[in-house]
Structures are given as C-alpha cells and as structure tokens.
Image: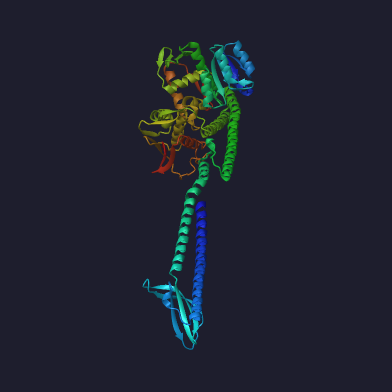
Amino acid sequence: MKILVIEDEQALLESILAYFTGEGNICEHASDFAAANEKISLYSYDCILLDLGLPGGEGLELLTKLKQLKKRDGVLIISARHSLDDKLAGLDLGADDYLVKPFHLSELKARVSAIIRRKNFDGDNVIHFNEITVDVSAMKINVKGNQVILTKKEFDLLVYFLSNRNKVVTKNAMAEHLWGDEMDLSDDFDFIYTHVKNLRKKLLEAGSADYLRSVYGIGYKFGDI
Amino acid sequence: MKLSNRYNKANILTSIVVLIITGIIYYVVIHFILTEKLDRDLAVEENEINQYVNTFHKLPLPASYLDQQISYKTLSGIISEREFLNTIYFNPKERENEPGRSLITVVHLDGKTIEVTITKSRVESEDLIRIILLITLGITVVLLLSLLLINRFVLNRLWRPFYSILNRMKAFEVTRMDTIEQEPTKIDEFNELNKSVNAMAERVRQDYKELKSFTDNASHEMMTPLAVINSKLDSLLQTESFTAQQGALLEDIYHATGRLSRLHQSLLLLAKIENNLIPDFQNIELKEMVEAKSRQFQELLEKDRLILTENLAPVEVKMSRYLADILLNNLFSNALRHNVSGGHIHIELDQQALTISNSGKARQLQTKIFDRFSKSVDSEGMGLGLAITKQICNLYGFRIDYREENGEHVFTVYFGD
C-alpha cells in the first residue's frame, strides 16, 4: 500500500509514519501545502491522510485539486476541528472518511485499511490472514474451510484486529471503535474482555491458531505467533 | 408606582388646590364688589330721600320706589347710628322672604328724628355669585378631566418607546447574538437611551464573542498536542518491552489523555450548541433512536446485570440527529453510571415527554445537577454530560427535569413547554 501523510505537526507525523510503515506499506509525507500539492500532482496513492489546517493553504483545496486531476486516491481527513460543517464539506469534496484529533493510531489504521479495501477491490472486500479469510462486504469468515458465525461486535473486532495485525491495540481504542467515541463511556473497559474471549473461542473452535494475546492488561495484540 | 401615576398624582393634586383657592378668592372678591355696588345704590337712595325731605319738607311715599322698600320709624330719644346690614325681608311682589341689604339712616323733619330703613333685594347679586361659582366649578371639573385624559393618552403614547426598549432589553440574550432594534422616536431622551442600550449590547456581544472564540481556539490548539501524546503512547506501546507495572502506568496515562480529550470535545460541543452552530435540523423518529441506543448499550447493561424495560410510542421531534444522539447517549450513560449492580432502567416515551428512570444510590437532590462540572463524589464522568443535555434541550425549547422518586432517579425531557 502506498500512503501519503500530509500533516504539519512533526511529532504526530513521525508517529503515524512509524505505525504505518512495514508490512509492505510505503509511506510518504508532506508537511505543508506546497509539498503536498506537488506530491498529489505527481504520484498516485492508495490513501492520503490529509490534515485540514496546513501552513500555506487550506487542506480542503487539495481535495478540490484531486478531483480536478480525476485521481482515485482514497482520502481520509484528520482534523482538530470537530465541526460538522468541515466534515460535510470534506465528504462532499470526495473525502472517504473523517477522523477528529486526537485519535488512536489503531483507529486511523483501521479506517485507512477500510478505505483501501473499498478502493482496490471494488466491492470484493476480502481480508486474508494466514488460514483466516474475512469477506467484509458479505460479513463471512472462513477458517480452513469452516464457516465461523460471529456477532456484529465480534466481527467488527476481528476486522479491527486484522487491520492492526502485529500491533498492540488498547481496550480504550477498541471500545471507541465498537461503540463510538460520543458514548461517554466509563473508564472501565473490562466488558471488552467478554467479546475478545468469545471471538478467540470461536476462532479456535474453527481451527485457527491462537493469534490473540493480552498485553499488560492494557490491550490485545493479534498477530503472528 | 409608575412614573406617570406619580406625575399624575402631583399634577392633579396641585391643580385641585390651585383651582379651589382661585374659586375662593373669586367668590370673596365678587361678593365684595357686588355688596359695594348695593351699598352705593342705597347711599344714592338715602341722598334722594334727604333731598326730597329738604325740598318738600315731607317724607317720600314708600311705594314710589321700585325694587326697594323704605320704611320710616319715628325715633324718640336714642339716635341710632347710620349702618349697612344684611337682612331678610318680605318681598310683596314675589310673596316670599328674600335676602336683602338694608341701610338704616336718620332724617330730621320738623324737629322729629325719623329712622329710615332702605332695603334692596340681594337676590340678583346672590344669583350672579352663584352663576359665577358654578362656572368656576365647571371649568375646574373640565380642566381636571382634560388633565386626566392628557395623562392617560398622551403620556402613555410618549412613554411607549421607553417600554418598547425595555421589552427588547428584557428579551436580549447574549448567546443568541441578536441585536436590540432601534425604536423610532422623535424624543431625544429615548433616542439617547436607545443608542446607549444598543452600544452596551454591542459591547457585551463583542466581549462574549471574544471569550467564546478564545475558548474555541484554546480547545482546538490543545487538540494537537493531545493527538501527539496519544499517538506517542500508541507508538510506545508497540515497543513491547514493559513490565506489568509499567503497563499499569501506561494505562493510567491513557485514561488521563482520554478524559482530557473527551473534556475538550464536550466543551467545544457546548460552545457550539450555545452559538447554535449545529445545522442539521430534521425530523427524528425518536422511538427508533431509543431502540438503537438500547442495542448499543446492551453490553454495558449486561455487564452490570441491569434490566431495561421500555414503553415507547412512535414520536417525531424536530432537531439535529447528531444532537439527538448525544442527548440519548448522555441520558443513557447517566442512567447506567449512577445505577447499582442488578438494578433496572425504565424508558417511557410518549408525545409529551421522554422519561428515563433508573434505580440507584440514594443521594441528596442536587439543584445544580445541570450545572457544568457538577457531579457526585463517586462519579467517573466529567460533570458535563447533563450540562450538554440541558443545553440541547434549551436549544430546541424542550424542558428537562430531574426528580428522585421512590428511590429512583427520574429524568424527563418534555418536548415543548
């Protein structure tokens, strides 16, 4: 996957790049409007992470530019502005998704993966991981030829893990992903445990290897053993 | 007491006193003048009698004088003094007793002293005085009436701009960002008042705006460092060389940053609702939303073994979907958070109101429950949820109410007043 990160905050940029690089991903970055403009004109990306407040110009203009160039790059807007207007304007201009700062890197990754899946496979939306095959559009999971029946939450959780494979995902991020960050949840995310336990059990029963590990009580990691 | 009433009172009181005094003076002076005239007439008569007596050496006949009576009395010894006095006499023409003015004088005829009493009717002058008095009284009454009418209608109309300005000031709300309109009037004082009020409102609005934009900007600016902290924490976590103790520390930091970002989002949301910056106004099927919300919270309900019962009627309200979602979120979260393990939640929805009641720990009724940062001691929340809920209700003219009933906490949102 080829990803362009347009972000002027250096520290944040570094974190995003570090999180996304690896596993065959190529990440490029731009820190201001001019550099970003040049990159999107010259190259094509699977997904562009676009910060709206950029030195030298407004991020939304880059969206217009992409449209003019008739590019099919996926765009995810990351903005500190939690404004419905910005969100609607961005989505109207052809952005695929909108994420408000501060966010969890795992959430960012999940959303980027979703955008890329939609773009690349044109509806044939399938994730492969070793013996596990997940058809996201049909909501079907296959492990070694066995159909696995999951609840909606467990399914979302699995897709989330697969998007963040080999990464530690916090319970906090998982809860926000599954229930939305507007929910004003309590700080006690232990109820996540039930879902993770059930998901793990169902996968093991279908014959998958045990990919899920609990990490320091903070979160979980799904990945190669 | 209204200014116009106060003014009326003073005005009318003075008018009455002045008019009464004028009337009295009028009466006395006219009375005096008419009496003088009668007295002069009587003196002329006396003079005529004297001349008659001197010329003809006999007394004139009483009948030869019109409108007056003359009587003679021969005096022996005591000579009374010449004097004017008011009397009552019998008028043979009218056949009745009438008030009169008499002059008692003395003539000397053939060595005899004769007392002459000349009496003239006072009826005419009395009538004149009475008419004058009546006219005066009439004028007084008319004057007072016109004063009252002037006060009532003219003053009311004069003060109309003032009350209009007053009403606009009362209706002024800084958060609504509306202006106090100019009230057209030709009166300088009111124009000045109008200008001052408008200038003041403008200043208040400006200050408020600056304060708001400061909060807004500050919150936005804080989001970026927060995003950095969050992303660094995520990155740090991936290095995976922690002890359990370090893991616990990391978890605490996660909690703190999570709270901080939620706090900021809540504050920004509050500012936005207050400034009415949430645009998507639409018809909301509240029943469906409540049902969806129940599903969304199912895991949390199960975790605390809470029993949820619902009695929902199809209700449509006009509001932003986004805010409706937040409203329900906050009420649900609240019912969950302040519940007891194994407790219950009941939701009632009809055309008038949405009621959420839940079991919970008994606590004193807090009147400040809807204030910002007001929360119970053991609450994990930030104390903004209900403040936001209240603001959303305010925005759409709903009314939210809290009461503690049979050990249950009951929140009711009334659609419309």
**Would you say A197 lies left or right of B203 here?**
left
Color scheme of the displayed model = rainbow
Please state which of residues A169 and B82 is positioned toward the viewer in this rendering: B82
In the picture shown, does residue B7 fall above or below B244? below
- The x, y position of residue A194, in whole percent, is 44, 27
Q: Residue at point 58% right, 15% down?
A: A65
Tell me how many marks there are: 0
- The x, y position of residue A29, in whole percent, is 62, 17
- The x, y position of residue B330, in whole percent, is 46, 34
Quadrant location of residue A26? Answer: top right
Quadrant location of residue B61? Answer: bottom left
In the picture shown, does residue B12 fall above or below B182? below
Residue B36 seen from this side:
yes
**Would you say B338 lies left or right of B95 here?**
right
In the picture shown, does residue B396 fall above or below A155? below
Please state which of residues A201 and B182 is positioned toward the viewer in this rendering: B182
In the picture shown, does residue A41 fall above or below B270? above
Residue lying farthest to the bottom in this orientation: B77
